[in-house]
Amino acid sequence: QAQLVESGGDLVQPGGSLRLSCAAAGITFSFYKMGWYRQAPGKQRELVGEITRGGTTNYVESVKGRFTISRDNAKNTVYLQMNSLKPEDTAVYYCNADWNRLHYWGQGTQVTVSS
């Protein structure tokens, strides 16, 4: 049974940093492209960024230069380092695993950026 578990969400002040983690189980993690998505209240879920099997990353324009995705295949974990956080980054952040028409989602972790 595939399972993705996000953690690390919190309340943080504007300009602050957070690191989200997504631990995977039940899949061959190294095969999967891993993505981070977010959904703000009243908005559609959007891709934040992703990392391929080979470690190539890409990001939505609004987070470029502030967010960094990395993966540790030995720990079956993908990370999202978020710096210079803004109120508009407030959302539930979801982890996604994608490979060969298989897609899995985590339950999400809340990030709130507010003073």
Image: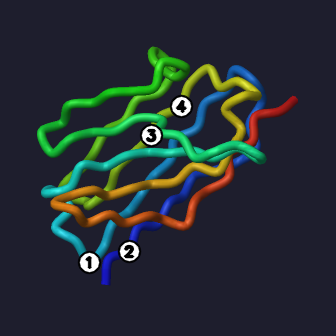
Nearer to us of marks 4 and 1 is 1
Labels 2 and 3: the sequence-earlier one:
2
Q: Which quarter of the rendered picture does the N terminus lie within?
A: bottom left
Left or right, residue 74 beside residue 96:
left
User: In terms of sequence position, does the residue under pointer 4 or pointer 1 come before the other?
Assistant: 1
Q: Earlier in the sequence, mark 1 or mark 2?
A: 2
Q: Secondary structure at mark 4?
A: strand
Question: Of helix, strand and loop, which one carries label 1?
Answer: loop
Give the residue at mark 3. Answer: 80
Q: Viewer-proximal residue, 51 or 8?
A: 51
- In this rendering, which labeled residue sits more in front, label 2 or label 3? 2
Image marks 2 and 3: residues in contact by CB distance under 8 Å: no
Q: Disc 3 vs disc 4: Cβ atoms closer than 8 Å?
A: yes
Q: CA distance from mark 4 to mark 1?
A: 27 Å
| Residue type pointed to by label 3 | Leu
User: What is the number of the mark on residue 82?
Assistant: 4
Label 4 with label 2: CB-CB less than 8 Å: no
Name the amino acid type tagged 2.
Answer: Gln
Q: Amino acid at mark 1?
A: Gly
Which quadrant would residue 26 be assigned to in this image? bottom left
Circle nearer the N terminus (4, 2): 2
Residue linked to disc 1 = 26
- Is 34 placed left or right of 12 in the picture? left
Q: Residue 22: where, in percent of width, then height?
A: 42, 57
Q: Residues within 10 Å of mark 4 (few under 14, many from 20)?
A: many
Q: Which residue is mark 2?
A: 3
Name the front one of labels 4 and 2. Answer: 2
Task: Describe the element under mark 2 as helix, strand or loop.
Answer: strand
Task: Name the residue: 65% across, 26% down.
Answer: 85
Q: CA distance from mark 3 to mark 4?
A: 6 Å
